[in-house]
Image: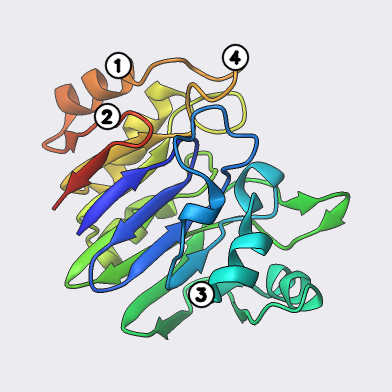
Amino acid sequence: MKITWHGHACFELVGSKRVLIDPFITGNPLAKVKPEELSPDVLLITHGHEDHLGDAVAISKRAKPKIAVIHEIAVFLQEQGIEAEGMNFYGSVDLDGVKVTMVPALHSSSYAGRYMGDAYGYVVEMDGIKVYHAGDTGIFGDMKLIGELFSPDIMLVPVGDRYTMSPQIAAKAVELVSPKIAIPMHFATFPVLVSSAADFKRLVEERSKTEVVVLEPGESYEL
């Protein structure tokens, strides 16, 4: 699997299928790609905030990916003429051979003043590899349960502080999940966020056996 970070919380997972998560490209100062260059087979959105929903509508209308999101966002997308499957916490769906399980996150979710359901993360299983995208979240005890239930190979974890976990708290979250590899996200996009993942990397690798891979926007990691 090839994992490309497009800045903020936007990742592209490429294996037998192409999975795009949180397609915030337009308005993302870190993005090195244009929305029209992304044609996913599967599109996932962790919550309704504009910096995560992003270009989902435009990409979906053009590329027509399979979509699995929380019920309220599914209804919102259906109102835009987009086919989307609704789901909820710890439910799973199979999207053309990509297994997607929705897991909790600790955050809010709205779009233009509209309630968009709870925020959440995903465990994505493709080609025998499990990736846990934590979404925008604070730390919570059931992260340990997510680790025990799914044994993710890779955890995509927010470290930017203010709206999500700080690097120090995110390092503890990684301890709870115990993935093989952690990739930080949701930092350096805007001045209010932590500008570097260096402290996160140092703390995780001091405290655990997890390897931290820090990507630059547009850079990829292959597992």
The residue type indicated by label 2 comes to Val
Look at the numbered discs 4 and 1 and tell me whether their residues touch, using CB distance below 8 Å.
Answer: no
Q: In what element is the residue under mark 4?
A: loop
Mark 3 highlights which residue? 65
Q: On screen, 151 above or below 175? A: below
Q: Is residue 159 visible?
A: yes
Mark 4 highlights which residue? 191
Image coloring type: rainbow
The residue type indicated by label 4 comes to Pro
The residue type indicated by label 3 comes to Pro
Image quarter where the N terminus lies is bottom left
* Label whose residue precedes the other's in the sequence (2 or 1): 1
Q: In what element is the residue under mark 3?
A: loop
Q: CA distance from mark 4 to mark 1?
A: 17 Å
Mark 1 highlights which residue? 198
Q: CA distance from mark 3 to mark 4?
A: 33 Å
* Label whose residue precedes the other's in the sequence (3 or 4): 3
Look at the numbered discs 2 and 1 and tell me whether their residues touch, using CB distance below 8 Å.
Answer: yes
Q: Which mark is residue 214?
A: 2
The structure residue drawn at horizontal position 17% and vertical position 72%, both measured from the top left corner, is 128
Frontmost of labels 1 and 3 is: 3
* Label whose residue precedes the other's in the sequence (1 or 3): 3
The structure residue drawn at horizontal position 39% and vertical position 40%, both measured from the top left corner, is 157
Q: Nearer the viewer, residue 134 or 41?
A: 41
Within-10-Å neighbours for mark 4: few <14, some 14–19, many 20+? few
**Left or right: where does residue 126 sit relative to residue 222?**
right
Look at the numbered discs 3 and 4 and tell me whether their residues touch, using CB distance below 8 Å.
Answer: no
Look at the numbered discs 4 and 2 and tell me whether their residues touch, using CB distance below 8 Å.
Answer: no
Within-10-Å neighbours for mark 3: few <14, some 14–19, many 20+? many
